[in-house]
Image: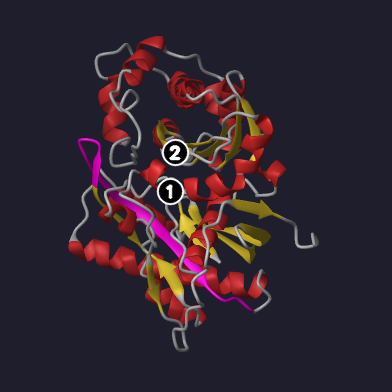
Amino acid sequence: MGLLSGTSVDGIDVAVASFRVDGDELTLTPLGHRELPYPERLRRDLLAALPPGGCSAEQLTKLDTRVGQAFADAAGRAVTEIAGGRADLVASLGQTVFHWVEQGHVEGTLQVGQPAWIAERTGLPVVADLRVRDVAAGGHGAPLASTLDALWLRADAEREGGPVGALNIGGIANLTVVHPDGSVLAYDTGPGNALLDIAAAEVTGGAQHSDLDGALASRGRVRQDLLSRLLADPYYSSEPPKSTGKEYFHAAYLRQATEGLAPIDGPDLLATLTELTAATVAAECERHGVRTVVASGGGLRNPALVTALRSRVTVVPSDENGLPSDAKEAYLTALLGWLTWNGIPANVPSATGSAGPRLLGTITPGAGPLTLPEPHPQALTRLRVTTPDTP
């Protein structure tokens, strides 16, 4: 089982998968997924604790506990409703509250959601803290989506005879580029929904957490003066590996970007931020010769953003390749947990910038003794996604 809450803080994504390994090929069979909302008070408290807001040790402790309990409830429901009462392992990416980047180098990262609550609730072992080991090895701890993409899309790249891209649009957008020889590059391209969500909340007086159906952006026009200012941010010209988050692209960032400009109405602001996400993603695709991206994430629910992207690059929802676009990162999390459990390094050094392959995460025992299987004896090179009925 994979659990996470993304940078948009929409709620908890949970997915259940079965895995079968044969030599260097791993088969992932999706068994079902859910998206469960946070309790509204918890969501408000999480958003208030994110930069540029402050967070005391007391608040952080309470958030770590309450998110852990919410994840535990989600896992318990998934065991019953999806796994038929039977599961072997839970993997949790938690909720990122701070990603500490100094001069392009990640010094630390913090995900809350104490895994002991999940283990206590389900009786299952839990793999958590999946980013930190990569960071300790000099990497960014992100994007970990590159682990799944590298295995999953290699056959597509071989068939195409050129690079294939995977795009996830959450609060932050990240791109993975997979080449036919198996080499991989991946990094955060910049904001996905982060600035859009902030602007939608401000424009609607808090009535909306996002630009529902892209309705606001569709009524607006791009303000080139603001767009030019936003595109001048040095993050976009910095070389990968690189990662970012809401500690960089936040409300104060947006206010500063609009200072000194003629008043910008709500729809124009949303239209401009939609163009920013589409333009920065497309620029990175063009840089690497990627013409088609297999896309996932909440951004695909925004027709205005999808239209802006499709005017520049071919967008194929990951659903068409077997992984639900709303749940791809939850299935990724399940994969990361399975790899760790089976003694297989779960990072891609060329993507994260780490010193080398590393086993990721820490393991919290379940109700019984902690007994790990023998490590898988060879590296994996491919991942096949099948339906439950596929032999």
Q: Look at 57% across and 24% down and name the residue there.
A: 309
Q: Which residue is at 48% across, 45% downward?
A: 146
> Quick check: can you spot residue 52?
no
Tag 2–tag 1 contact (CB < 8 Å)? yes
Q: Position of residue 282 (x, y in %)?
A: 50, 23
Residue identified by numbered label 2: 186
Mark 1 nearby-residue class (10 Å; few <14, some 14–19, many ≥20): many
Front-lying residue, 326 or 126: 126
Residue 23 shown left or right of residue 365 in the figure: right
Rendered image quadrant of residue 317: top right
What is the x, y in percent for residue 300? 59, 37
Residue 245 picture quarter: top left
Residue located farthest toward the bottom when viewing the structure as drawn: 368
Q: Magenta region: which residues?
A: 86-106
Residue under numbered circle 1: 348
Amino acid at dot 1: Val
Q: What secondary structure characterizes most of the magenta part?
A: strand
Above/below status of 258 relative to 355: above
